[in-house]
Image (tube, rainbow, N blue to C red):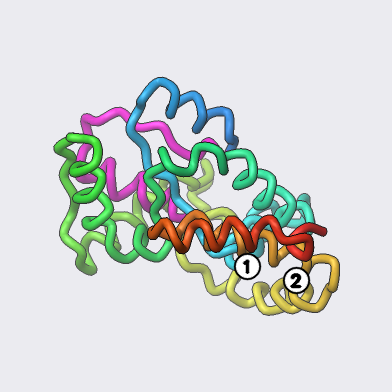
Amino acid sequence: SANTFAAAAFKLANPDASLASHFHIPAFIIHNLRSRTPGVFLIRRPEASIVSWTLYWEGRMKLEDSLDYYVDFHRSLRPYLARLFVVPFEQTTQRFGEVIRDFNSRFGTGYASLPPNATTRARCNTYVEDFIRSGDGSVNEFRVSRPSAKRDGLKPTLLAALRKSPRLSRKLKTAEAFYTLYTGTSKTAVNARENALNAPECWP
């Protein structure tokens, strides 16, 4: 996930800094906003996020469960959108130095970042694997937050199921509307997306 990659990149560059991450619950984020604690709100495109989350739970969570949680999570935080420092998945995993630069600018902090090169990615992947490594030294390919050939082989089937179901497709439209709303910047764009999100066809 971008959460684990970001945590790895941040801690490797700022080993003495305190960090809280992987709290996928609105209450934690709302609490930090109210206490004025600086933070990064990471967001991923719905299809990729839903499939990834379903695989992570190794059959204990269905596609629809993951989709419902994506919608509920972002719906709960919608009133706080203007206060969130939103960063898309792709920017986090590919240009994390820009994220730290913009974060420092917004919150007046002075955190460091690693150079965007192969060495940095290798160090982050090692950190990520060690984070999930079992006592016997093995790494669960369903849960490790780096590219995985095993997961890649399973994703097409889940994506097809997500797109084929009329019920899931309707819910997916709602999830996509939230993603567009959260990643929009101009006031005109946000207003247009709010209107689209309130349209009856967006709700299952």
Residue 11 within the segment the image draws in magenta: yes
| Residue lying at 67% horizontally and 73% vertically, measured from the top left | 154
Name the image quarter holding residue 160.
Answer: bottom right
Residue 110 bears which disc, if any? none
- Counting labels gives 2
- The amino acid at mark 1 is Glu
Would residue 55 be found to the left or right of residue 28 on screen?
A: right
**Residue at 39% across, 60% down:** 186
In terms of secondary structure, where does tag 1 sit? helix
Which residue is situated farthest in the top direction here? 35
Left or right? Give the position of 200 relative to 139. Answer: right
Write down the quadrant of residue 178 in the picture.
bottom right
Is the residue 152 above or below the residue 60 in the image? below
- Please report whichever mark, 1 or 2, sits nearer to the chain's N-terminal start: 1
Q: Which residue is mark 2?
A: 162
Q: Which residues are magenta?
A: 1-24
Residue 145 on image: x %, y %: 48, 56
Q: Which residue is mark 1?
A: 47
Whether 10 is among the magenta residues is yes
Find residue 131 and report its horizontal and vertical position in percent: 44, 44
Residue 20: percent from left, percent from top:
41, 32
